[in-house]
Amino acid sequence: MLFWQRPDLVQTLLPNVDAIEVQQLRNTANKKLKTQQFTEMADAIAALPTPQELTRPIKVDLSGPFVEIGKFNDLNAAQHSQLQQTIDILGPWRKGPFRLFDKEIDAEWKSNLKWSRIENAIGELKGRQILDVGCGNGYYMFRAAHGQPKSIIGLDPSVTFYCAFELMQRFLQMKHLQYERLGVEHLYVFDQAFDIAMCMGILYHHRSPIEILRNLRQTLKVGGVAIIESQTIPGNGSVALFPEDRYAKARNVFFVPTKDCLVNWVRRSGFKNVEVVSHLKVTPEEQRTTKDMTWESLADFLNPADPNLTIEGHPAPYRTVIRAERQFL
């Protein structure tokens, strides 16, 4: 489903994408849209005005911490009320911050901090074709759009995140940004299609991180750059934690590597020029409960007597960013 008409960016990647397979995967994903929840989200977005229906051009700023769209006076009272209702329906907000017509969306993660760590490592964006695996609500796609890439395709199966992305696109209408409700397991449909691939916050949620990294490499053109970000644990040596049950209250966590282990994974997956860009402990400044994400967050996941440990007694999380290149076929 499209909330506004635009060209299909997958077609621009031919012959480096299996477009027939992508369409079949889309058809399967579309079945998940036949829910009351999606109908409510879609109806809320559709009730908002398009840029063509507003009386003045919308000012957009994608250069700062906020993905900023419009000003307060662009909307009337009824439209502001509808916008707030839509923001509430699309919660909890995990990535941000966003500022829509002067309404600030305070997400759980201050994703601008992570963007500041990777921005220089990515390199030149102008004219590049970019893949964002596990793109969430598209925050990093919008930030990358400021660099004038040729195209950005984001992959994420979440219907809620898709709708949050489409809320922004309701007003931005950026034809070179596209969201595909596909997962990391579908990377095989792309073969040497992208100049840059971002894979952030994905590896530890899957049983086969090496397979993901090998498939991520395959999506890149020769000379392409990967930005790989993962939850890690402190410590030396190429080892990974495999929690018996949960890590920081999350069941869907399998391997949590040390920094050295993550580097080793990336190298053994065929990447070259592997460089650690950032390795920092996660703090409540970056991940926390907010008015737009009222569920539990980092403070609830750590041992109250020792914040260096999770509630289960595991080492508390770090986040590590790696830059790597594909140099050969």
Image: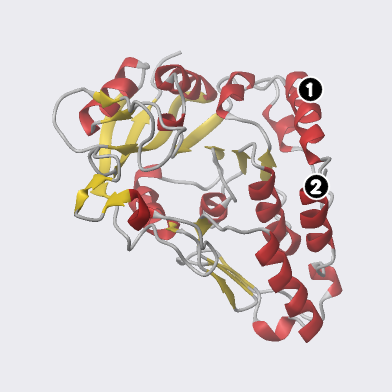
**Frontmost residue, 157 versus 193:** 157
Q: As drawn, is 232 to the left or to the right of 111?
A: left
Q: In this view, does 142 lie above or below 73?
A: above
Label 2 element class:
loop
Residue 120, percent from left and from top: 35, 50
Query: Distance from label 2 to label 1 (Cα)?
Result: 19 Å
In the depicted structure, whether residue 313 falls above or below residue 287: above
Q: Measuring from the top left, give residue 125's x and y in whole percent.
A: 49, 46
Q: Where is mark 1, residue-wise?
A: 24
Q: Is 190 positioned to the left or the right of 51 in the image?
A: left
* Mark 1 element type: helix
Closer-to-camera residue (134/241): 241
Place residue 315 in its image quadrant. Answer: top left
| Front-most of residues 267 and 97 | 97
| Picture disc at residue 6 | 2
Residue at image point 78% right, 61% down = 45
Q: What residue type is labelled 1?
A: Gln
Q: Residue at x 42, y 30 (%)?
A: 203
Q: Which amino acid does label 2 sit on?
A: Arg
On-image quarter of the N terminus:
top right
